[in-house]
Image (cartoon, grey):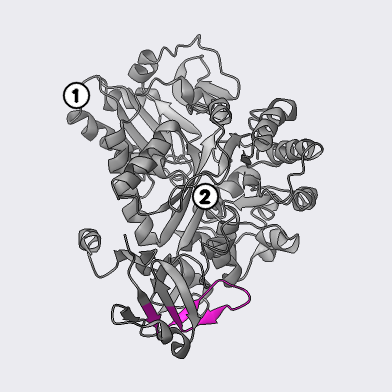
Amino acid sequence: MRKPDVIFFNGDVLTMDDSFPQASAVAVKDGMIVAVGDESDVFDWKTEHTKIIDLNGKTLMPGFIESHIHPTIYGSTLLEIDCRPETTPAMEDLLQKVSEEAVKTPEDEWIRGFGWDDSKLVEMRNPTRWELDEAAPNHPVVLKRSCAHMAVANSKALEMSGITQETPDPSGGHIERDENGNLTGLLQEKAQGLLDVPRYDLEDMAEGMRLAQQQFAEWGITTVHDMSTQTTDLQLFQYLQEQNELRVRVRPWIWAIDQNGFDGSLDEVLKVGLRSGFGNDLVKIQGMKFMLDGSVGGKTAAMHDPYVDTEEKGILYNSVEEIHPLMEKAIESGLRVAVHAIGDRAIEVAIESFEQIHNNTNITGMRNRVEHCVMPTVDHLRRMKNLELVAASSIGFLYHIGDNYVAKLGAERVNHLFPHKSFKEHGIVAPGNSDLPVNSGNPWQSIYSAVTRKTSSGQVVEQGEQISVWDALKAFTVDAAYSSCEEQLLGVIKEGSKADLIVLSENPLEVKPDHLKEMKVQQTYLEGDLTFSQSQSYEEVLKG
């Protein structure tokens, strides 16, 4: 279907192209940028069919690219109990929501929720199975923590899943017990995979993704990297595209091996011969995703030094000897590799694994990735640069859960987390991300923290690693596009790039840094098609 021809003029155009950073007008033809400059140049493209949009001094820039989220998981959470601290600040509120859901749910059907955070609950602790039993005695209940690395289940859910006091901890996971050996209901990391929770069907997933896409458009996000793609996810993206309902670009990273309740597909992907880049403009395969540790909030990220006031050093899922041969199989088959590594001990395993592969196969230029990359050392940065690895930095963590990081790691270690200035100085491309639904996917909150090094409470973390607003914007546009080898096509306004655009009421380069987190998107366009307007309902936008 032919895309609309559009000219935007009379605005501040932030191109995110270092060689030509600003302009005042842009011409779009059939979904592509055909001219960027001033009005006199751009209006040469005007025809009787061209739609003219006067920006009235507003700012136009490329749509945001989220380099690490879980879109279908986020979509499913929109179908579940909302347990985020904003809606359930105290345990009483959380349990009340479970009780309300139990009233309208048939007995023995699962009740699911997402988003509780012990560090933000008034009680500063995890829910227990006994509390969930009281709230919903006749239903299996499972509530996932905001980090998705822990879940709490009630007695009925444990029973239906065959989890008893005698069940051993799985490798890379932990089943919590109290001082008397009784199950508390908390399952960490791979232990979550023991729960026999029914999967959502295709139509449920489609409904969740429709809701998610609406939010993406409101945030100005036009491309998402799905970092835990399962078979059903890939089927969903194709189904929505067939129905002409996919309104965000998806870059799937396929889950490699069985972990954390996810089914690994490495062998199947290798068998059918998929390679990175297979697909089309909307859905394009990126590679394989591996996972080496957990989260700081759950004290399961793998550290060299223990967490504050504990002897705990987190959970390392795999050694170099275990993970590197699997990564090597993927790379030798033409698939890029992304490795979840938060703690310094996990980052070391990731880099050493890449180095061993590089001894046999040149991997520079592939743009393999270290996901989150929260705690790299200076030595890690040097080695990452040598391998030309991408640091997919979850800078959104600093805003949303930075206070908890300070509590768990101490101020000194936190000062060196998410080192965006050091990434830049070492020549490492570091796209930003939120890890939605672990945190809100609003890119402005992440951009704010990258620039100010402040958490959501206003606590200041060492400012030596802060970066400019321009560089923070690049982390969610052209640098994120670089991580999918599409920096000439996405995340930038230049001739030959896609017309994925957002309109802002203010120029982020001109507002005070503390105002960045308050920025709003007024319109979002995907290939020149309007997908969000602040002045119209979503239904009106879809009708055109």
Kindly identify the amino acid type of the residue bearing the numbered disc 1: Pro
Res 90 visible: no
What span is colored magenta in the figure?
A: 7-26
- Quick one: label 2, few (<14), some, or many (20+) residues within 10 Å? many
- Quick one: label 1, few (<14), some, or many (20+) residues within 10 Å? few
Q: Which residue is mark 1?
A: 106
Q: Nearer the viewer, mark 1 or mark 2?
A: 1
Instruction: Measuring from the top left, give residue 405's x and y in whole percent.
Output: 59, 47
Magenta stretch: residue 17 in it?
yes
What label does residue 401 carry, if any? 2
Point out the residue furthest to the bottom here: 40
- The C terminus - image quarter: bottom left
Kindly identify the amino acid type of the residue bearing the numbered disc 2: Ile
Instruction: Measuring from the top left, give residue 126's x and y in whole percent.
Output: 45, 33
Query: Is 488 left or right of 280, judged from the image as shown?
Result: right
Instruction: Measuring from the top left, give residue 290's x and y in whole percent.
Output: 60, 35
Q: Quadrant of residue 104?
A: top left
- Residue 523 sits above or below residue 310 on the image: below
Residue at 51%, 62% (x, y): give it. Answer: 490
